[in-house]
Each structure stands twice: as C-alpha cells, then as structure tokens.
Image (cartoon, rainbow, N blue to C red):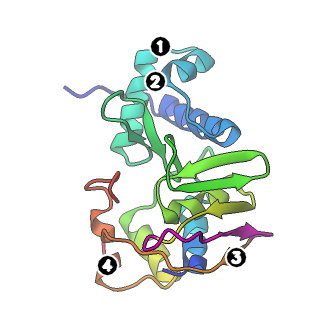
Amino acid sequence: MSVSVDPELVNDVRQSIYATIVERGTPPAACEVAAARGVSVAAVEEAYRALAGSHVIVLALETGEIWAAPPFAAPPTAFRVTSGRRAWFAPCAWDSFGIPAAAGVDVEIEAHCAWDRAPLPCGVRNGDVYGEGVLHRLVPASRFWDDIRFT
Amino acid sequence: MTLDQAWQLSKLWYGTRLRPDFRRPTADEARAIFARVGLAGPFWEL
C-alpha cells in the first residue's frame, strides 16, 4: 500500500536533518525532528522513508533512523572532517570533499591510504583543495545505489 | 579521481544540498556533471 507524503513536510524534514548535522555533527532522531516541527513521529518516519526512496538519505536497516545524509555519515567512519571545533564523518572519500562543498566551509580531512594506512592529510583551504592522493572507487556509477553502504 | 576532481565534483554534486530548493540531479544532469570534471568512460556511464 502506498502512502502519500506531503512534499512540503519532506522538504522541511530534509532541511532539519542537514541543519542539525552541520551544527552538531550527527543527524537528528525522528522524534527530535517531530518535536521541533510539531508533527508526529510517524509523519517524520514517513518523510525519512520518502527521502531514502529518492536517494537523498540512507536509513539504518535495524532502526529506521538515519545512517547517512550524504555527504554526512551518522556513525564514525574512516573519513573524519573537521572545521575549527566542528567535526563530521563522511561515508566515503568522495563525500569527505562533499562536506565542505555542502557546508561552505574550509576543512581538514583525516584520511588514510587504503593500502598501508599511512596518513593522507588533505582538505580545503580558502576554497581550494590541498593534499596529495588519488581516490579509487570500486563500484561503477550506474550501480552506486545497488548497495550504497558498500559503495 | 584526483583530489581536485573530487573537490570539483563535490561542489557540483553537493553544493546545493542544504538549500531549500535542492533536488537531486537527473540522470542527464549527473552525466553532464561527471563530464564537466573529466570523469568519462564506461565506469561513469549511467
């Protein structure tokens, strides 16, 4: 059975998700968004599913809460991104550059070589990228969303 | 991809993510973004 979701609520929820992540580094639980927006938790969960269905966010299979709102990840990952006192995690190397692009800030990225774990400091300073390295992607673009957690 | 390609791609892909009027790129728009930063070939086909 399909359930219609108010597009305006979905857009509001998306903005709440990203505003919270940018501010504190982690996404909000559905109940937090519901309280902030004055709507039911069920309505927010439905908006979460709509956003996941359109590949805007990724939900944790176990809880239905947010696993990633690309370029931000909810759990700690190998890609920690900092800007002053603020810190975030990215789901992948590409998304570690997506964070400064989305948030409009300079960042330092704590990345490591996939081969020998050597640190690969890089980031964005004054709007320009710095550091050395090459990003390898294993999954072709047409299959990014087949298993986005692996991608 | 190089770090600069990742940064240029990120700006095009994620630069509007926090805006009220954000929408995901269509397949054609995604292809254009990949091409604009020099990501071409079978790996980047959609």
Question: Image point 48% across, 23% down: which residue?
Answer: A30
Q: Which residue is mark 2?
A: A44
Three-letter code, disc 3: Tyr
Dots 4 and 2 on the same chain: no
Neighbour class for label 3 at 10 Å: few (<14), some, many (≥20)?
A: some
Same chain, labels 3 and 4: no
Q: Which residue is at a point 60% across and 74% down the rendered structure image?
A: B8
**What range of the chain is rendered magenta?**
A114-127
Numbered disc 4: secondary structure = helix
Tell me the residue at 64%/62% (across/down): A109
Q: Residue A11, how many percent across, how many down? A: 53, 36
| Residues at discs 1 and 4 both on one chain | no
The residue to which callout 1 is attached is: A40
**Percent of width and height locating residue A134:** 51, 80
Residue B18 visible in the current orientation? no
Q: Badge 4 is on which residue?
A: B43
